[in-house]
Amino acid sequence: MNDIQRSLAVAFTDCLGVKPRETVLVVTDEGRLALGMAIRKASLRYARESLLAVMPVRANNGQEPPPAVAAMMRGADAILLATTRSLSHTQARERATAAGARIASMPGATAAMLRRTLAVDHRGLQRLCDRIIPRLSGARTVRITTARGTDLTFSLRGRTARPDHGIIRGPGGFTNLPAGEVYVAPLEGTASGRLVIDGSVLQARVRRPIAVAVAGGVAVGVGPGREASRLWRELARHGRAGLNVAEFGIGINPAARITGNVLEDEKVLGTVHIAFGDNSHFGGLVRVPSHQDGIVKAPTVTIDGRTLIDEGKLQL
C-alpha cells in the first residue's frame, strides 16, 4: 500500500469508521478527479459498495452541487467530498447530514497534504477540542491581536463552539479532512476593529498582509494592494451577507503547515482564522453561497479577559 493509501486508511478506519455493510460515496469534480478516484479505490477495502460522483467545478465555496449529486448524498452512509470548492456550507451537505450520513469535506485537498496531515493522533485532537470548547462557548468578548496590527473584538453570546477533530463514527457526523480546529460563529453585528490576514486567503499564501476594517459585524474596507482588492471583490459581490464576519476558528493540527491551501492552513497549530460570508450551517444566521477564510499567524487571543492563546501558543 503506498503512502496515500496508508493515509486514507486512517480516514476510513480511525475517522469515519466505515463498516463492511455500508455504502461510501466520493463526490469529486473535474479539478480533483485523480484524487477522487484514488479515494474511491481506497474505500473499496472497507465498504460494501463505493460510488463516485463527478461534477463540474463550482464557481465558489458554498455553491450547491447539482441536484442529482445532492440526491446521491442523501442515500449514502459515508461521504467524502474531494472537491475543488467547498461543499461544507451547503444545504446539500446539511440535508445529507440530517439524513444520517457521515461526511468528510476535503475541498482543495491534495495527495501530498493528506500524506502529511492524516497520520496524526485524532484522539489527541479530540481531547484538545474538549478543553478549548468550554472556553469559547457563550463568551461575552473575544479579542484577537497580533504584532502585525490585528485588533478585532466580537461576542459569542448564545453561540456554541464546535469541534473538528476528524472522528465522526456516529450518524450525522461532519468534519474536515485533514481535521484539527475548533470553530464558532460570532454573534452577528458584534465584530469590530482591524483584521490583518498574513497567512493565506482565497487559496493562496499572502505575499503582503491584508488589512480588513470591520464595523457592525461586517467588513467595510480592505487594503493595501492587489491581493486585498481581489479579496474585496470576492466578498462584496455577494452583498452585505458576503461581508459578514462568519467564523472564528483555532487551528490545532501539529502536522499541518501553511501552503496556500486554506483547507490545511486553517488547521495549523498556532494560527487562527476569520471567515466571511455564510455561517448558517454552524449556528449563525447568515445564509449566502460564499465562505472565505483568512489565516492569521501568531495571534494573541483573550476570552473575557483571560488569555487562551499567547502569540500562537495555547494556554491550557
Image: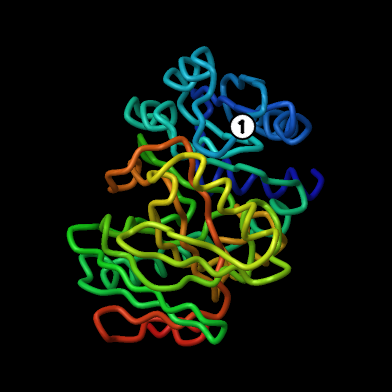
Residue type at tag 1? Ala
Judged left or right of residue 295, residue 315 is left
Judged left or right of residue 227, residue 64 is left
Q: Circle 1 is placed at which residue position?
A: 59
Q: Position of residue 176 (x, y in %)?
A: 52, 48
Q: Position of residue 75 (x, y in %)?
A: 44, 18
Q: Residue at x 40, y 80 (%)?
A: 301
Residue 17 appears anywhere in the view: no
Q: How many marks?
A: 1
Judged left or right of residue 267, residue 134 is left
Q: Residue at x 32, y 59 (%)?
A: 217
Extreme residue toward the right, this view: 2
Give neighbour class at mark 1: few <14, some 14-19, many 20+ (Cα, 10 Å). few
Q: SS for tag 1?
A: loop
Q: Is residue 24 above or below residue 141?
A: above
Q: Residue at x 64, y 52 (%)?
A: 230
Q: Residue at x 55, y 39 (%)?
A: 61
- Classify the position of the N terminus by image quarter: top right
Q: Position of residue 269 (x, y in %)?
A: 56, 72
Closer-to-camera residue (40/308): 308
Residue 171 appears anywhere in the view: yes
Q: Quadrant of residue 135?
A: bottom left
Q: Position of residue 58 (x, y in %)?
A: 61, 29
- Classify the position of the C terminus by image quarter: bottom left
Closer-to-camera residue (219/313): 219
Q: Quadrant of residue 94?
A: top left
